[in-house]
Image: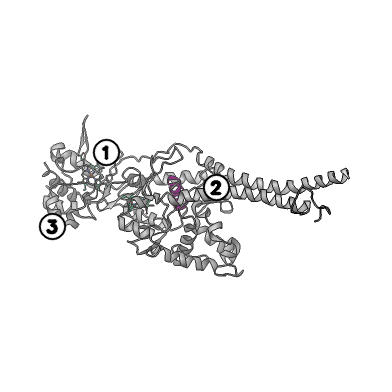
Amino acid sequence: MTNSIAQKFNLLAQFLRAPFCMSLRLCMILLITPVLVTSIWALDLNAAEKATKKSEKKTSKLVEYEIFNLIQSKSIPKPLAGKKGNWKRGEALILDIAKGNCLQCHRIDQFHEKAKKNPDVYGNMGEIGPSLDGVASRYQDSQLRLILVNAKLVFPETIMPAYYRIDGLTRVDDEYLDKPIMSAQDIEDILSFLMKLK
Amino acid sequence: MNFCSQHCRTCFAGIRICDFSVFRRLLSVFSFMMVVWFMTVFMWSMVAFAGNGRDKSIVPRDKTNPLSNLWSGYYYAKKDIQGLQENRQENPGFKYITEGAQLWEQKVGLRNKSCAKCHGKPSVSMGEAGARYPQYYAPFKRLINLEQRINLCRKNYQGAKSFEYESRELLSLTTFVRSQARNRPVRVKVDGFAKDFFERGKAFYYQRRGQLDMSCANCHENNYGKQLRSTLLSQGQANGFPSYRVAWQKVGSLHRRFQGCNKLVRAKPYALGAEYYVNLELYLNWRGAGLEVETPAVRD
C-alpha cells in the first residue's frame, strides 16, 4: 500500500515538474528580455570622429585675390572684379534663392516694411545667422568681402557657405562643379548693398 | 494516461487524483499566465493612456548621443500636418498600408508563397522588425534596410523579382511592415558586426558636402528649431519613414529624403539603397533611438 502511494507521488512529481518548468521559463524569458534589450542600449560608443578639415587654396579659375591677415582681422582689401558694386543689383542677389539667398539664414530689418506688401520675397527671414542690420558699422568693407568670399576663414566652423570658392569641396553636383556660387561681380554688388546697412 | 484507479480522499468532488493534479497544474500555469497578462495589459495601458507623446522630447538612453533631447519631426510640423498624421482616415499614408496588407497576403513567385505564409500575423512577426532595421546581414557582410530585406525575401523565399526602390509596391510593403511597429521605440543594434557601418554612417553625417559645403549636422544638429527661411528645421529624425510629404504628394522613403537634403546643398546624391545611405540610416536611427516609430508620418 505505502509502496504504491510513493510510486504515485513520484509520478505526480515528475508530471508536475516539466510543465511547471515550462511556464516558469516562459515567465523568466518574458521578464528578462526587456532587461537584456536595455543593456544593449547602454553600450558605449566611440567619441565623435571629427569631420576632416580641408586645406585652403586659391585656384586659377577664380580671379586672384589677396587675403590680408592682420592680428585681429582678416580681409580682402581690393575689389574682386576691380569694379565697384551696384547695390540695387546686390539687393536682388541677396533675395535670389539661386544666388545669395542670404535671407535663408539672416534677417534684415529694413525689409520688414517691404515684407508687409510682398511677403514671399521679403518675408520669412531665417534665424540661423545673426541679423545683418548694422554690419557696415561692425565691419569694414574689406572684412565683409572676405566673409562673403569664404566665411570659414573668419568663422572656422560656420554653416555659412563660401560664395567664391571652388576647391576643397566634397561631391559637388555636376551642375555646380568648378563654379563658385556667385561671380566676382556678384560679390561686389552684394557688398555694396551691405555697406548701406549702417 | 491513467495514474490511479482510486478516488482521492481529499477531494470532496470525487475526482481522481490524476484529474486533481492536472487541475492544479493548469491552475498554476494559468496563474502565471495571468501575472504576465496583467503586466502586459498594464504596460500597454500606460502607453495607450499616456496620450500622444510625440510633441514631447525624450532623453536619449545612450549618453554618447550628441543630442541632449530627442524630438520627432512631428514636433516641428504645423498643427494641421500633425492632425493629418494622426487621422487614419485622412492620412494618405494609410492607403499605402492597405495596399501593403494586400501584397502581404498575395501569393507570388515561383514558390507561390505569400509573406503571410512564412511570417503569419504581421503585428506579431513584424512588430519588432519595423523598429530594428537596418541590420547586419552576414551573407552580404554589410547592413541591409527594410526595403532590401523585403526584396531579399522576395528573391530567396518567394522566387519573385525584387521591387524597384521607390516603386509603389515596395513603398507600400515597407510602410505596411514598419507601421506594425507604430508607437514602439526605435531600437537599432550598433555594436558587433554593425559597428563598422555605424561609424561610417556617422562620418557621412558630419562630412560637409556640396557646393554649399554643409553637413547634416550643420542643419539638424546645430540649428534645429530655427527657421530656415520659411521652413522650421527639425532634428532630421528617421522615425516617421516611409512618410507622406506634402511636397512630394506621395509617400517616400528615407533615402529619397537623403537625396533631397543632398541636393539642397548642391551635392551629388547617391543612388537609392546605396550602401552610404544604409549606413547613414543606421546612424540616424541610433540618434533617434527611443523615439516612437510614426510610420506613416506626414510632413510638409
Say which amino acid is labelled 3: Lys
Which labelled disc corresponds to residue B277?
A: none
Parent chain of label 3: A
Q: Nearer the viewer, mark 2 or mark 3?
A: 2
Q: Residue furthest top?
A: A71
Horizontal and vertical percent position of residue B207: 38, 45
User: For the magenta stretch, what is the residue range?
Assistant: B277-289
Q: Are there few (<14), some (14-19), or many (20+) residues within 10 Å of tag 2?
A: few
Observer-nearest of A33 and B153: A33
- Judge from the rendering whether residue A88 lies leftward or rightward of residue B160; answer left or right: left
- Badge 2 sits on which subunit? B
The front one of B219 and A113 is A113
Residue placed under numbered mark 2 in the picture:
B39
Q: What number is the disc on residue A153?
A: 1
In the visual, does B56 lie left or right of B278?
left
- Asked whether residue B300 appears in the rendered view, the answer is no
Asked whether residue B271 is drawn in magenta, I would say no
Please tell me if label 2 and label 1 are on a single chain.
Answer: no
Residue B161: % across, % down: 54, 67
C-alpha span from label 2 to label 1: 59 Å
Mark yes or no: residue A97 visible.
yes
Q: Secondary structure at mark 2?
A: helix
